[in-house]
Image (cartoon, helix red, strand yellow):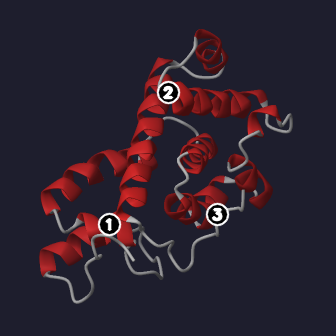
Amino acid sequence: MPRIEPLTPPYPAPVDQALRRWMPPGVPHEPLALFRVLHRHPELASRMFVLGAGLLGHGLLPAVDREIVIARVTARAGCAYEWGAHAATLAPQAGLSPEQLRATADIDTAANTSWPPRHAALLDAVDALHDTAHLPQPAWDALRVHYDDAQLLEFLVLAGWYRTISYLANGLLLDEEPWAVPFPAR
């Protein structure tokens, strides 16, 4: 049971309008529980929407790279809620296979040689940030081969953003969405 209950319908008109902005058109699900909890503080939700929507819809990283980062960050943070929501929707749309998604939740993924060098560099960098909150020079150099300055900045913000989202979902004890992909057993 979540520590703060998500809002339930019927929503006041401004909240309904805001929640619709958070969800892609034509999605057959209620707005995510995370979004419905955030709207208990509409100003905070509004500020968070700008960055979150910008990273997902207007980023410079290829969609598959973005979803690898999100999956690895949320997996390393033990955030089954966010990992499962992306694994069910945006990650497959970006081209990640179920096997690749499961591999993002494996602590030893960096040793898996099936990732192309670009994706292995992302996974290594996420792991370094998760473990130390620093990015060692070899990890930076490996990313630099594949990404320009703007993409590298976006990578750092994306990883930090989904760490924040993981803290939020885990701190709230949010139950996984009923349609989400179950987090792999460790």
Residue depicted at 41% across the width and 66% down the height? 173
For the residue labelled by badge 1, is the local secondary structure a helix, a strand or a loop?
A: helix
Residue type highlighted by circle 1? Phe
Mark 1 lies on residue? 35
Quarter of the view holding residue 2: bottom left
Q: Decide: marks 1, 3 in contact (CB < 8 A)?
A: no
Q: Secondary structure at mark 3?
A: loop
Residue 146 lies, in percent from the top left, at: 65, 22
Amino acid type, mark 3: Phe
Residue at 28%, 76% in the rendered image: 5
**Quarter of the picture holding the C terminus:** bottom right
- Provide the residue designation for mark 2: 151
Which quadrant of the figure contains the N terminus?
bottom left
* Front of the two marks 2 and 1: 1
Amino acid residing under circle 2: Gln
On residue 183, which mark appears? 3
Residue 38 percent across, percent down from the top left: 26, 63
Circle nearer the N terminus (3, 2): 2
Which one is nearer the viewer's eye here, 58 or 48?
48
Q: Residue at x 69, y 47 (%)?
A: 104
Q: Identify the mark nearer the N-term, 2 or 1.
A: 1
Measuring 79% from the left and 37% from the top, which residue is drawn there? 115
Give the CA distance from mark 2 to mark 1.
Answer: 27 Å
Q: Mark 2: which secondary structure? A: helix
